[in-house]
Amino acid sequence: MTDTPLLEVQDLSVGFRAGKETLTAVDQANLVIYPGQTIAIVGESGSGKSTMAHAIIDLLPGNGRVLGGRILFEGDDIATVGRDKILALRGSSIGLVPQDPMSNLNPLWKVGAQIKEALVANDVAYGAEADRRVVELLEEAGLPDAERRARQYPHEFSGGMRQRALIAMGLAARPKLLIADEPTSALDVTVQKQILDHLDMLTDSLGVAVMLITHDLGLAAERADHLVVMYRGRVVESGPALEILQDPQHPYTQRLVSKAPSIASQRLSSVKAREEVRAQAVEHAAEVAAEVAHSGEEFGEGNKDILVVENLTKVFQLRGAKPWVKTDFTAVDDVSFRLQRGTTTAIVGESGSGKSTVARMVLDLLPVTSGRVLFDGVDIKELGSKKLQLRFRRQMQPVFQNPYASLDPLYSIYQSIEEPLRTHEVGTKKERETKVRDLLDKVSLPTTVMSRYPGELSGGQRQRVAIARALALDPEVVICDEAVSALDVLVQAQILELLNDLQAELGLSYLFITHDLAVVRQIADNVLVMQEGKVVEQSSVNEVFDNPREAYTRKLLDAIPGGSIPLASS
Amino acid sequence: MPETRPGQERFVAPVDQTPLRAIDAVDVDAVPESQWKEAWKRLRVSPLFWLSVVIITFIAVMIFFPTLFTSSDPSRGSLDNSFEPPSEGHPFGYTQQGYDVWARTVYGARASVAVGVLSAIMTAVLGMITGAIAGFYGGIVDTLISRVSDIFFSIPLLLACIVVISVINNMWPNRGFWGAVAVVVVALSLFAWPQITRQMRGAVLEIKNLEFVDAATAIGATRMTNLRRHIVPNALAPVIVASTISLGVFIVAETSLSFLGLGLPSNVASWGNDLSAAQNQVRSGQHLQLMYVPAAALALTVLGFILLGEAVREALDPKARKK
């Protein structure tokens, strides 16, 4: 290995024009990559990490430009050279694997033709020779049956396969540097691991340097030996990966290291904290249950198991090959579980495992094909009167995944939180306002947001509003369907803490649906692992983490990035 | 552990350079803005919008206070004045029948704009109801409404109106001004609603699957409540845009029908009737102002409404705006 850097970024500043102002997205950033080395740039959304990558290959959008600094590629400043020089560099010297595999392949072109384009554009190969290379490249990227695959269209590929095709494309002209911009964020964890393992192997054998851009500190530390942490457009800390992880210096890095779920979930402290939460929650829940059991007015019987799901099955009828033929698709297959008062049961699974379908059926938003859902001893399908059905709705509330779609954009925050109270005709207008203020206080939002609209709040703040709305009717069960999945790491940690606090304070019971096993340890007591509609493993959190019985569970646990990193004792 | 290479030594930025912000803090001072208020804010700075406002205000004044523009009576013609050239108070002279050209044009605005506005409102109402029902209930109801709207969509608007109005003309010959307007409005709306239906159906289909609708259901809201309180209000924007733009189209359609002698009866002052009467002048090449004046009024009015539609579209759909 040589000691001349492949890429040097010196005091790079990038700005975006917005009206008359220029907003600085990257502020005097420095980094160095040596040939064949893998480095990772870590930061939350808006930290400027992608902007820096785009500046390097001159792919900034029209209103963005380099304000200062130098980008030296093999010693030449490429920040100031003309378009031709950059065009010559792109592909042949610097390759890019973009973020979203779903939108980065042209749906009208065969996959092979799109990779061939990369070969022809960089004068690597032409004609039949290029076709042969395409197959080799796809094979190299780990696609079985590459010859047939090259003749297929993107819609015939799964997300993981598309990402492999994009990797093949990025490496087509054998670049010296590959920029991978969140290459696996849109994929399931097990697929993510496969693809990154393969990318590691490939770039190692080819001697390609990799600049990995990611929001996941665990993943970054596992894959790269040099880390660059960005915050608000600046590089706040950089250095050897292990050193940073074990001894973070900058307060932002410290925050990140302490909150990143993949790393935090390994800490015993999070398990202990969870135990305390549960102890309090169960105590409060028992008080609630006693009240329910004594007063005849409340809904339910005051059972210990607030929610019992028995043999729940959902069969969807899909359009078959012919319009009059319907094929059955079993999305949820014989799922049973119990949720105890004051505890959290997590349902974990990859996309398509049926976990959200379970949530929707429990919420009575989707009719069940067979099986029963008992809420505190009452079958929710046998609530005869409209009045009882409405009464049931008060006891169980959802918090959904997408903070941008779960609030009506035309409703002010006040209207959104007041809506359940109004629907159930709770209290007078004055009392309702007091209640809304109280709820906002519970989710730590200032009352000044009452008159605002969802569009003016951040994702995390909207999720707080959604939680406040869910709590408006004093439910006993809250169903969180991927409620923290769309949030930045630190915000996610904050919302998880909020959910824990509320559980301890109010004795709530949660059904927590997630694809991310890493957060489970921070919030859940019991876990259901689902695969293709079936429950493959069901146990307590500690049992599943320490002694997974099923191969699939082990695979999921292994795929949590950063699992193998030794942590400093804390 | 690999050795640290030059340029990759441990680096920690001074904390005061990038001070930590509270995670996800709320800006307490920001002023709340609803979607409509925001749209109005964008509209307010749009030159297109103000140009259309000027034009439409001008037309509106012409409709409500025609006497500000002319003192002649548009319905009183005298053959003594046939083809009289322009004179004091009669800036564009007289028609063959001896009507004041300017007065006819000023009073003609009323019929044209009435037809345009009423047709736009009626198609919007029809289209919104059918579209919302089709999109929301789906299944057989959707198929039924969609196919019927397809059938109506496939019939050329003007041709269909010609047939309908001819039939009504035979059944109800001597109708007054509002009767005549009503017939044209009904004929136009009868064949123009599918466009709005499609818009509305598409918007409702998209919105009904959003999570806030599920959240409302989980609260205990009924389907009707959801449709009324959440889905329709959110689907309104594209319909408003389509209706505003269609307004100009309806005015043109009315003029075309009147030109063919099928829109408003010839005793009603309307631009289409004036243009129809001016056909001979086009052929002879004399007294061309008989055609130019109502044509210019028509063009200006349509331009006004189309500009308004465009401005509203830009304000309500910032994604469609040019960079």
Image (cartoon, coloured by chain):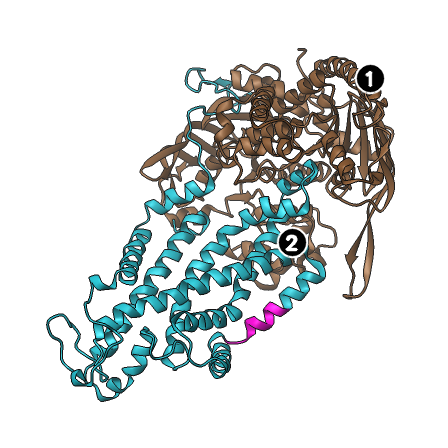
Chain colours: A brown, B cyan
Which residue corresponds to mark 2? B136
In the rendering, at what x and y percent does residue A423 appear?
65, 36
Three-letter code, disc 2: Phe
Figure check: B144 above or below B291:
above
Figure check: B149 above or below B278:
above
In the rendering, at what x and y percent does residue B130 appear?
60, 60
Residue at 35% in and 58% down:
B307
- Residue A171 visible in this rendered orientation of the protein: no
Q: Is residue B50 left or right of residue A266?
A: left
Q: Are marks 2 and 1 in contact (CB under 8 Å)?
A: no
* Residues beneath discs 2 and 1 located on the same chain: no
Q: Which label number is shown at residue A290?
A: 1
Q: Pointer 2 indicates a residue of which chain?
A: B
Mark 2 vs mark 1: in front: 1
Residue at 20% in and 71% down:
B72
- Residue B238 visible in this rendered orientation of the protein: yes
| The one of A121 and A393 positioned closer to us in this rendering | A393
| The one of A198 and A125 positioned closer to us in this rendering | A198
Q: Pointer 1 indicates a residue of which chain?
A: A
In the rendering, at what x and y percent does residue A477 appear?
75, 27
| The one of A95 and A173 positioned closer to us in this rendering | A95
Q: Is residue A551 left or right of residue A159?
A: right
Q: Which element is circle 1 on?
A: helix
Q: CA distance from mark 2 to mark 1?
A: 43 Å
Q: Within 10 Å of the Cα at label 1, are there few (<14), some (14-19), or many (20+) other Cα atoms?
A: some
Q: Which label number is shown at residue B199?
A: none
